[in-house]
Amino acid sequence: MSKILAIFGATGHQGSSIINFVLNDAELSQEYKIRAITRDVNTDKAKQLAGKVELVQGDFHSPSSIETALTGAHTVFAMTFPSFEADKDFDIQYNSAKAIADVAVSKGASYIIFSTLPAVSRISGGKYTKVTPFDAKAKAEQYIRGLPIKSAFVSLGSFMENFQEQFFVAPQPAADGIWILTRNHSLKTQLPLIDAVGDTGKFVGAILAEPEKYSGKTFCAAVKLYTFEEIVDLLSKSSGKTIKFKQIPDEEFKASLPLMGDVFVEGYRYGEEFGYFGPGTEELVAWAAEHARGKLTTFEEYLEEHPFQLSA
């Protein structure tokens, strides 16, 4: 009998990647029956899943819906969403993850896979304390590790999709047809990149295939590290436009952002100084890539499939 794999965020980048991977993996598709959990079962993306998997409604703000969604589940993939409310984001994300984990335990689930992020405040020794989306997930990870349930973790690098989707940090037009990508860190800063839609499932799939082997482990999930010098060059080639990098002061960068300015300013500074995943980032990424279940997508390959587009 197939084990129920309950996946939160089923219509998002991470959840949809896991669903597609499991459905198309000869072994995992036989071992697991997917229960896709989403806040709204009436969206177009949710309706597209309805004929492929069990589709159920689940909302962090409705404890009863979480209990229903996790009844009978064997393995749970849990994730949280940024609230984009800087003063509330930490509590909202932490409490959401805690609620899922507590219900999973109470319902007798055997395994939790949690989408975590590095503990920026701890790694930086208290220097950077405003990167709440990271710290909230890191605290939730520690809580889950203390529960009477087996667990493993995926800590995703920066999404390749973000260069197109996060318009507020995208290159901006300047004089003479030049586009400028501004950041408050140096051109040599490295960023671990992951094709979130294409490759999240390959990391989670490795855990699903060998849950005992990876119990307690964290996959720092990315194909490899790219400097911003490499990133700007690849974006230029893909778009057919000349993109140049410009480092600007923290306050100027913060003023250019429409929301969560402190999060981005401190997040980028932290990454430059301590590495995205902290000490040993390069080795952590290499280990995760080596143990992924399938070939990972390079940024070059991603841009061939999804050409970078710029519009003034």
Image (cartoon, rainbow, N blue to C red):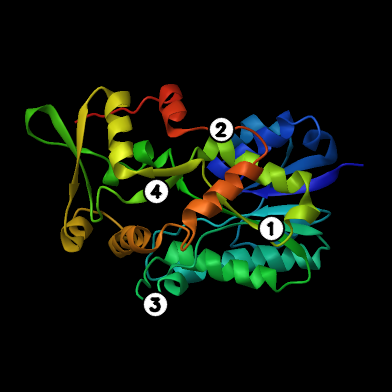
Q: CA distance from mark 3 to mark 1?
A: 26 Å
Query: Please, what secondary structure does the residue beneath circle 2 have?
Result: helix
Q: Position of residue 156 (x, y in %)?
A: 52, 50
What type is the residue that disc 2 sits on? Asp
Q: CA distance from mark 2 to mark 3?
A: 43 Å
Q: Quadrant of the N terminus?
A: top right
What residue is shown with label 3?
Answer: 126
Answer with mark 2 or mark 1, whichever residue precedes in sequence: 2
Query: Please, what secondary structure does the residue beneath circle 3 have?
Result: loop
**Which label was assigned to residue 152?**
1
Query: Please, what secondary structure does the residue beneath circle 1 have?
Result: strand
Q: CA distance from mark 4 to mark 3?
A: 22 Å
View extreme (left): residue: 175
What type is the residue that disc 1 sits on? Ala
Give the class, few, some or many, for how many residues have Cα within 10 Å of label 1's Cα (few <14, many ≥20): many
**Which label was assigned to residue 191?**
4
Give the class, few, some or many, for how many residues have Cα within 10 Å of label 2's Cα (few <14, many ≥20): few
In percent of the image, x 48 and y 59: which residue is there?
Answer: 277
**Nearer to us: label 4 or label 1:** 4
**Nearer to us: label 4 or label 2:** 4
Give the class, few, some or many, for how many residues have Cα within 10 Å of label 3's Cα (few <14, many ≥20): few
**Nearer to us: label 2 or label 1:** 1
What type is the residue that disc 4 sits on? Leu
- Quarter of the image where one finds residue 78: bottom right
Q: Are marks 2 and 1 in contact (CB under 8 Å)?
A: no
- Residue 3, visible in the rendered structure: yes
Q: Are marks 4 and 2 in contact (CB under 8 Å)?
A: no
Q: Position of residue 70 (x, y in %)?
A: 76, 56
What residue is shown with label 2?
Answer: 44
User: Is 57 drawn above or below residue 24 in the view shown?
Assistant: below
In percent of the image, x 7 and y 33: which residue is there?
Answer: 175
- Quarter of the image where one finds residue 254: bottom left
